[in-house]
Amino acid sequence: MARFRTWVGIAVAGALTVSLAGCSSTGGKRAEDARKAAAAQGRAAVNTPRWTFAMITHSGDGDTFWDIVQSGAEQAAVKDNVDFLYSHDDEAHQQAQLVDAAVDKKVDGIIVTLAKPDALRAAVARARKAGIPVVTVNSGSAESREFGALTHIGQDETIAGEAVGEELDERGRKKALCVLHEQGNVGHEQRCDGVAKTFDGTVDRLYVNGTSMPDVQSAIEAKLQADKSVDAVVTLGAPYADTAVRARRDAGSDAEVATFDLNAKVAAGLQDGTLAFAVDQQPYLQGYEAVDLLWLYKYNADVLGGGKPVLTGPQIITKDDAAALAEYTKRGTR
């Protein structure tokens, strides 16, 4: 496998009912059945009590990134003899209510994203008051320690954005469009901030309605038609990369398209040259390590990070790397 350009070191250790989770558009019932089948074939590697961990994320329906996070968490849960409950809502107050429901259920551990941290503050405090250990994942690294979480697992979004800015400079780009598909998500703002910090060119921000791909495409297309000087488009999630490619084509633009996160379509786009590069934060690892670290805490009072986030990225992935990762993206682990 090609050696990836890694911007930071990676430190890692070794729905409330399913109906709450909402099936992803990436496979629906078939994807859910495949996950259950894979889990059924696994065997617990430990004989610790049958603890129950709940993961509550800010994912919307149909986001392939969160399918991968969930897959990693489920695999770790099988190994760790853990009952795993997954739920999600892209509305912050609804996500907070799901955390409250997990507290009421008296789960043994909670994994939560803090994309909109202020809305989750009280719910996380209630979990801690109830004696439930909390691990934050993916979003909210700056707030995790303040909220009293054991640790945070994910990439530093500002550093990831800085890596993108440096890569754009290496490619000779002069004006970049940073496409934000979820307003109010602090991690997305941090990514664009990071790009602007290291990129020698100009960065424009474009806020789009991420729940409607036709709206996303038309907004990017209109921007590219109106400003021919834009020579790079950066999307903040893998599902939006292909949409940006179509918008570029229809606008008659020569701008390069890059994206945060990786999936099978992104890997294919890197291989055929329609995408310039991607930033991988290893979502499978985020889910897997979140469950593993909660288990380690329950079993042995172990905590990783020393008060700092446990980083899972970023890695800059290019055409040279894509072929080696293709088989992993197809099986849903990268």
Image: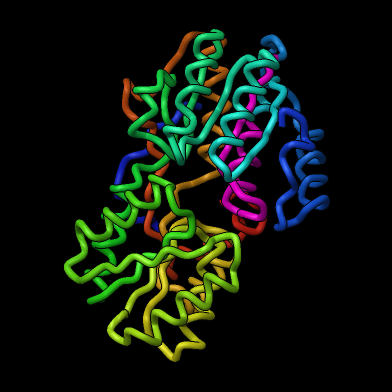
Q: Residue at x 42, y 73 (%)?
A: 257
> Residue 141: x percent and y percent?
37, 34
Q: Position of residue 95 (x, y in %)?
A: 59, 35
Residue 1 appears anywhere in the view: no
Q: Nearer the viewer, residue 267 or 128?
A: 128
Q: Quadrant of residue 88?
A: top right
Residue 52 visible in the picture: yes
**Apparent side of residue 17 relative to residue 224 in the rendered image (left or right):** right
Q: How many labels does the image show?
A: 0
Q: In the rendered view, would you say 137 is above or below 5?
A: above
Magenta stretch: includes residue 57 = yes
Magenta run includes residue 241:
no
Taking the spot 61% from the left edge, 49% from the top edge, the residue there is 60
Residue 68 position (above or below residue 292)? below
Q: Residue at x 52, y 63 (%)?
A: 209
Vertical side of 302 occupied by 79: above or below = below
- Give residue 208's position: percent from left, percent from top: 47, 65
- Please state which of residues 102 and 267 is positioned toward the viewer in this rendering: 102
Q: Position of residue 30 (x, y in %)?
A: 82, 52
Magenta span? 51-76
Residue shown at 46%/81% (left/top)?
Answer: 221
